[in-house]
Image (cartoon, grey):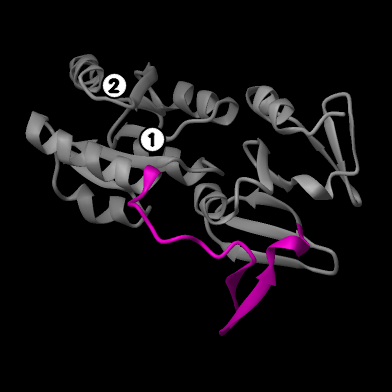
Amino acid sequence: MIKAIIVDDDELCRAVISDLLKEVEDIECVANFGNALDAFKFLNENDVDVIFLDVEMPKMGGMELLRNLQIKPLVVMITSHDEFALESYEYDVTDFLKKPLNTPRFLKTIEKIKKTIVGEPAEKKNDDYIFIKSDSKLVQIKLEDIHWVEALGNYMRLHTDKEKHTVLSTMKEIESKLPTKDFIRIQRSFIVRLDKILSIEDNYVIMKNKEIHIGKAYKDEFNNRLNFL
């Protein structure tokens, strides 16, 4: 289920989007906010797949909210003014909707969201390695050498036995390229390779030279994936 939130100071617009989402399969509106400050707090504590975000709001506008988020879900910008469209795409938004919303255009946005998150049927992936861009060249990294991956704002850092690699990417993009049989996300900012875990103590995974807290929202899935004797 794709988790969405709505952020708009216009109560009627929030109600319209909420009603439209109820008619859509596989997307759930988990919260809606009349201001960006409350949404910012929620996003820092919860995992969300997509934001329906108004551009113009008091105190903190939609663009400012995006500038302050470290981990950005997919974003659908909503506004009454076309001139904000160009600026919004600088933030790599998924789509731009103009008020008043109309159902056919909204459903096109939903399809775009689903294709971005779920993806199209693809050929079998090579699970042995990935290529990352380093300076002006592509560097091959064997997946078996990766210990963990952490989010650093708009960048991701891959930790291997001997070195670290920092790439411009998102957690969702990295996660989609790692085989689920070998890797698991244990909190909003960390993915670990299962066979690199040395031990588990309380709510922490012990890796080589690193202790990583297991997020509450990810604990059940993590426990289910462990190979207990």
Marking on residue 9: 2
Q: In which quarter of the image is the C terminus?
A: top right
Q: For mark 2, give the secondary structure.
A: loop
Q: Give the alpha-carbon distance from disc 1 to disc 2, as whole Å.
A: 18 Å
| Residue that extends furthest to the bottom in the rendered view of this protein | 136
Q: What residue do we see at 64% from left, 49% from top?
A: 151
| Outermost residue to the front | 229
**Which residue is at 49% across, 29% downward?**
40
Image label count: 2
* Type of the residue with mark 1: Val
95 relative to 101 in the view: left or right: right
Q: Nearer the viewer, residue 47 or 127?
A: 127
**Could you say where residue 226 lies in the image, as x and y percent from the top left?**
76, 33
Indicate yes or no whether the magenta region holds residue 119.
yes
User: Could you say where residue 97 lies in the image, as x and y percent from the top left?
Assistant: 18, 39
Magenta span: 118-146
Front one among 206 and 66: 206
Q: Which mark is residue 50?
A: 1
Q: In this view, does 114 lie to the left or right of 178?
A: left
Would residue 113 be counted in the magenta stretch?
no
In the rendered structure, the answer to whether residue 74 lies left or right of residue 156 reads left
Q: Quadrant of residue 221?
A: top right
* Horizontal and vertical percent position of residue 196: 83, 50
Q: Quadrant of residue 70?
A: top right
Residue 7: x percent and y percent? 34, 26
Quadrant location, the N terminus: top left
- Of residue 59 and residue 9, the one placed in the foreground of this image is 9
Q: Which residue is drawn at 76% across and 45% down?
A: 194
14 with respect to 36 (left or right): left
Q: Name the kind of residue labelled 2 in the image.
A: Asp
Mark sitting earlier along the chain (1/2): 2
